[in-house]
Image (cartoon, helix red, strand yellow):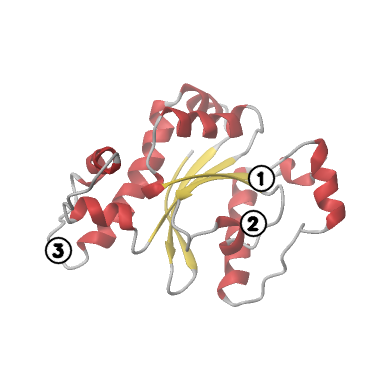
Amino acid sequence: MSDQIQLDSQQALDRLLVGNRRYMTMRQVHPRQTVIHRQNLVEGQHPFAAILSCSDSRVPSELIFDQGLGDLFIVRTAGHALNEVVIASLEYAVFALRVPLVMVLGHGQCGAVTAVVTAQDLPGYLPSLVSSLRPALASVNLAAADGIDEAIRANTRFTAKYLATHSTVIQQAMDQANLRIVAGYYDMSKGSVEVLSSTE
């Protein structure tokens, strides 16, 4: 069994942020990526954190946090939009895998949020993505010079709070002090992750 399952939420967050600093400075160690470690994981997984992030190809969590196989349970949707399957996937990480930390990771230049802000006319199912993100932006001054970036940050905080208040599985884990939810923001130009808010 991996020692990662023994981490508490602060230790899990620290491990993510330390890995991100390695990534920022190009001092990655690419941990737990050996053939032996891969074979050990066949018997089961014990990730130390779950991450809900955007599907954007420039935001691969394993890379920006310099983590290895079996370390992170990752769910990705455009704009880290929520639906029942997404929430259920995170509930699985909390209930079955006992992760102590869930991070919602937004990022600069998010195309999904930009589409909402600029009211783009989109085909197919894309309008449903826009409508799912719009409630998070109600309090943001979208006309401001930094309106899009503030909208991205607001969407990330909103998503984290929604998870904490709309899932009984997640609420129970938090009530038992077994889980912390953190909203983070990834700056693509710097490669850095900033913690925006935390719910315990």
Q: What element carries label 2?
A: helix
Q: Position of residue 119 (x, y in %)?
A: 16, 51
Q: How far apart are marks 2 and 1 (CA)?
A: 9 Å
> What number of labels is visible?
3
Disc 2 versus disc 3: nearer the observer: 3
- How far apart are the two marked residues, 1 and 3, measured between alpha carbons? 38 Å
| Mark 3, secondary structure of its residue | loop
Q: Say which residue label 2 marks.
A: 15
Picture coordinates of residue 99 (x, y %)? 63, 38
- Name, please, the residue furthest toward the front: 124
Identify the amino acid type marked 2: Arg
Badge 2 crowding class, 10 Å Cα cut-off, few under 14, some 14 to 19, many 20 or more, is some
Mark found first going from the N terminus, 2 or 3: 2
Residue at 57% across / 61% down in the picture? 17
| Residue under pointer 3 | 144
Q: 28 or 177: which is nearer to us?
A: 28
Q: Name the mark on residue 158.
A: none
| Residue tagged 1 | 48
Crowd tier of the residue under label 3, counting other residues whose Cα lies within 10 Å: few below 14, some 14–19, many 20 or above: few
Query: Is residue 178 shown to the viewer in this render?
Result: no
Check disc 1: other Cα within 10 Å, few if <14, some if 14-19, many if 20+.
many
- Residue 73 falls left or right of residue 104: right
The secondary element bearing badge 1 is classed as: loop
